[in-house]
Amino acid sequence: MRTLFKFHGGVHPPTHKAESTRTPIAQAAMPSKLIIPLHQHVGNRAVPTVQVGERVLKGQIIGRPEGRLSSAVHASTSGTVSAIDMQTVAHHSGLPDLCITIIPDGKDEWIEHSGVDYKQAPHTELRHRLREAGVVGLGGAVFPSDMKSYSNKHKIKTLVLNGAECEPYITCDDLLMRERASDILRGAEVLRELLYAEEVLIGIEDNKPEAIAAMKQAVQDDQHAHMEVIAVPTLYPGGGAKQLIRVLTGIEVAAGVRSTEKGVQCFNVATAYCAWRAITYGEPLLSRIVTVTGNVEHAQNFEVLLGTPVHELVAQAGSKPDTDRHIMGGPMMGVDLPSGKVGVTKATNCIIESSPKLFPPPEPALPCIRCTRCAEVCPAELQPQELYWFAKVQNFGKTQEYDLFDCIECGACAYVCPSHIPLVQYYRFAKSEIWQREQESQAAEVARERHEYRLFRVEREKQEKAERLAQKEKAALAAKAAAPAPVAATANAGDTDNTVQMRIDAAVARAKEQAAGSQPKNIDTLTAQQQADINEIQARRAKIREMASNAGGDDEPPKQS
Amino acid sequence: MIAALLVMVFISLVLGAVLGYSAIKFRVEGNPLAEKINAVLPQTQCGQCGFPGCKPYAEAIAKGEADINLCPPGGEEGIRKLADLLGVEFKPFGEGVAPKGKAVAFIDENTCIGCTLCLQACPVDAIAGAAKQMHTIIASECTGCELCVAPCPVDCISMQPIGEDISNWKWRYPTIPLVQAAQ
């Protein structure tokens, strides 16, 4: 028997898991349209590769990954792209983001795809396949899996497979483990190979005996040598990566340290399943299991195509008429969806239909009485009451001193707070303010550098120009020394210090010389009449020049005709 | 008596020499206070304070020649930071000086004649272009200082406010209805 460890704090909210585990996973009906956001993962938004009106096949890439930290987005079924525009997405802000809308043609026609044998293929290819298949962490963090399945210098000893599913109401991983255990384990084996890990520890909370039994059976049947299924005590938030690692291995992952530095990497069971499908069959991540529960007639898990509008999905579970909002995720950490029209994304593990009866509006908050019950339950061993205090007065420096960024926003503190203070909202507010300030100061630093470089550049250009001029002057002086006649002319003009004037004078002198040197060629055979005309014109010109020089009185040389 | 005096004189001479030497050896380059003030300023280089850039303004504040409430892009928060740093009272913005929302410059490329005047005005080299070639703003580097707007002879530069989208959205300050004590 393995010794298990404990993490600090934790709460026991009513689990409400039984409602949705009575029936097996059902295939959700083909939706009337798919709204697929291009930013379903951590990192850069995918770049659309299709055009409006284009026919796409199931599994075709419609958004290619951009940059290192990004993931591909695919068409979940065959159909026609009807729009690429900004649509409301499942996000706290309720703001729109770029989505691709596909009208399914009902044929569900696959694009050509094939898998590889993970034992033969090089690791770089496997990771590339995960990226191209859009495999991201399905536990909720949606971090691209190809980035996580890399072990620098083989430092990872333990791969933790997270099947804890600690949040109330959610049962999608439970059902997946019950029904598809062997594929999950095969996926875990692939990830273990990629990480060069020695062991795989599968942590499942002990309120899921069927899943534990199924997984144990699969480990036995497929003779996975390095794997162990471990039942962990049911305690929210035991499914947090740091908490599960603590329980299974006893390793404490300190503030600002990644678990990989301690030799542990953590994947969700559904991620392992998708990794297996992607590598062995070449099937990208097109659907996921979603628990539909709460205020519905028959709560159930569905296999849902990504992009399915939430209202079409909940209708299949019989959403009751008094439903006032949809919650994506669990009741502790979930997102209030801005509307039922948003599409299911890779992060959608659960849709809870909420009614005023099921989740009554929160009681009005009372002042903090410093009872520190929040500190007792905080799984990150923070001082939530202090963080609240500092976040409330917007003393963000202090919140950081109190390790605000270790907060996993699990909501345990707000759950036990006798004053009903929405603590997590304060922490989120403080975090986003700090992030913004950080970004601003970075931008200011860049602007300062660019400005300083510009000043340097302008100065340098000035210098270079002066140098060029000086060189030209030198060359001009040398030329003048070589040709004495123009030098004499310019010397007469005076003002030798003014180089521009000197150069103008030199040019004028040169032109004069040229004119003097050249003789018109058409005056050899002139008639007497013509000669007389010419003489008359010349005389007139001489007169005009004389008048001009008398009137102006300046020393400007006469213009050449 | 004399011996004691001599000892004291000797000690004072030695210490004086040490102090004098270290004042030369460990001289602080530049004005450290101005550097600190410059770090607080938003580096838009917009000149709205009346100085040609953030650093000259920082130097003026350090010398006590300028007020701390002259920087609209820094906002009231910027004034607060400066007040904290300098140990002076917070001072609100003067009449007609108010922070504006963030914006980036935008060149209407159909109207641009390629005169390069805006290129010369931009303090952070955030405009790409050349003589008789169309210019364009490198939006990611633009500080929104508006210095390029005035020089444009064809008025093709406008300031576009930066709207809120998912990437820059922030959590709001939680508002909680407090229960009346009298209830």
Image (cartoon, helix red, strand yellow):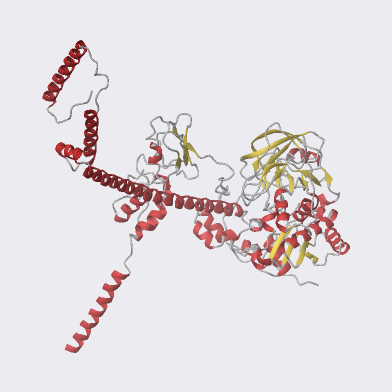
Q: Residue at x 16, y 17 (%)?
A: A540
User: Which residue of the protein is positioned furthest toward the right in this rendering?
Assistant: A221
Q: Can you see residue B63?
A: yes
Q: Position of residue B43 (x, y in %)?
A: 41, 49
**Placement of B41 over or under A532, stated as above or below:** below
A167 or A538, nearer to the observer: A538
Query: Left of A512 or right of it: where is A112?
Result: right
Question: Which residue is at a point 61% across and 49% down the rendered structure image?
Answer: A67
* Rendered view: A128 above or below A151: above
Residue A256 against residue B112 in the figure, above or below: below
Considering every residue shown, the one lying at the far top of the view is: A529
Quadrant of the rendered structure where residue A104 is?
top right
Percent position (x, y) of residue A152? 65, 64
Quadrant in which the N terminus of chain A is drawn: bottom right
- One can see residue A320 in this view: no
Looking at the picture, how far across and down is residue A133, in whole percent?
73, 48
Question: What is the tally of numbered marks visible in this picture?
Answer: 0
Asked if A152 appears above or below A437 in the picture, the reply is below
Identify which residue is drawn at 52% across, 62% down.
A401
Task: Tell me residue A131's x, y (percent).
Answer: 70, 51
Q: Nearer the viewer, residue A393 or B14?
A: B14
Depth order, front residue of A394/A218: A218
Identify the image quadrant of the C terminus of chain A: top left
Horizontal relation, residue A325 to residue B153: left or right: right
Question: To which quarter of the image does residue A421 belong?
Answer: bottom right
